[in-house]
Amino acid sequence: MSSQSAEPDGSKFVLSPNVLGVLWMIVAVTLLTGMFVTAKILMRTLPVLEVGAFRMFMSLLFCLPWLFANGPRVLKSERHWALFWRAFFGATSLYCAIYAVHHMLLADATVLTFTIPLWSIIIAALFLGERVRLRRTIATLAGFAGVLLVVKPQAGIDLAALIAILGAILAACALATMKDLTRTEQAQKIVFYFLMYGTLILGIPALWVMEMPNPTEWAWLVLLGFFGSAGQYCLTRAYGSGEMTIIAPLDFMRIILAGIAGYIFFSEVPDALAFTGGAIILASCAYIVRREAMEKKTPSTPQVSR
């Protein structure tokens, strides 16, 4: 009998890696948008700091099966300070993001948190000595012009907008720290320490403002943790499945979903300036992310900013 498969050609449907990555990414951005919608609902009745702490804690609970299955040995590391700083930047960035979501339109807050690529370029230029060439400089300046349209400084800069921008800067620092950690540490270990340290970083000060959740709020808090954990998992699977040049720009779908969710759940409608600024930020950041992904695909090309 022939060693060839008995299955006729075409009888088994297999998705290409890029299509699979796109599907993972669509699920990821939906879940992560759901996380911020849930947080905004919870912050109607619970303190912002408490919601942030529970976001960390509930997601940590979803990681415990991994720890129980592999044992404490998987937590061994010689880079605890680096793991702590990644968690510090990530946890404080999360707090800034949900604070902004609480005090701003969901779409506007989401747009400002997506300025991470702009701040990453500045951090790379100032602290890592990377060259920033003309095209990427133009894209960065255009992105900041979009930020001004969303923030509208002529009407007085809103504190929540400044905190949203601070959150993006902290997220850029967290990303830089995480990239360094991935050279020596497993992804799941980095996530676990992020959630463990993050729970402490936000949880200890939250004790001073904590209010005991009612049964409905507990249900929302569990959903918050699920959305956060599942969203990050799907995000990881998306980047692991497809090409970054295809997958990364899809993350900006969150801005569109945030606008739709803000209208449906909170009757929010961004003004024309915010729409214009968001479109400019979206275009400039998508260009920067795509350029970075293309450079990573060509190892023979010097790894410099463009």
Image (cartoon, rainbow, N blue to C red):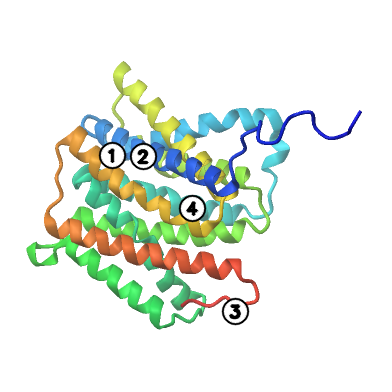
Label 4 amino acid? Answer: Ile
Q: Earlier in the sequence, mark 3 or mark 4?
A: 4
Q: Residue furthest right?
A: 1
Q: Nearer the viewer, mark 3 or mark 4?
A: 4
Label 1 amino acid? Answer: Val
Crowdedness near tag 3: few (<14), some (14–19) or many (≥20) residues, C-alpha within 10 Å: few
> What is the CA distance from the residue labelled 1 to the residue labelled 4?
32 Å
> What is the CA distance from the residue labelled 3 to the residue labelled 4?
23 Å
Residue at left offset 24%, top offset 58%: 278
> What is the CA distance from the residue labelled 3 to the residue labelled 1?
44 Å
Q: Which of marks 3 and 1 is in front?
A: 3
Question: Residue 112 bears which disc, if any?
Answer: none
Circle 3 is placed at which residue position?
302
Query: Does 155 sit above or below residue 231?
Result: below
Residue at left offset 59%, top offset 30%: 64
Label 2 amino acid? Answer: Gly
Circle 4 is placed at which residue position?
247
Residue at left offset 62%, top offset 44%: 189
Q: Nearer the viewer, mark 2 or mark 4?
A: 4
Residue at left offset 36%, top offset 41%: 205
User: Is label 3 in a helix, a strand or a loop?
Assistant: loop
Residue 204 locus on image (x, y percent): 41, 39
> What is the CA distance from the residue labelled 2 to the residue labelled 4?
28 Å
- Look at the image and tell me whether residue 32 can be seen: yes
Q: Tell me if label 2 and label 1 are in contact, CB under 8 Å.
A: yes
- Position of the N terminus by quadrant: top right
Circle 1 is placed at which residue position?
48
Q: Earlier in the sequence, mark 3 or mark 1?
A: 1
Circle 2 is placed at which residue position?
52
Q: For this rendering, which residue is in front, 128 or 205?
A: 128
User: Is label 2 in a helix, a strand or a loop?
Assistant: helix
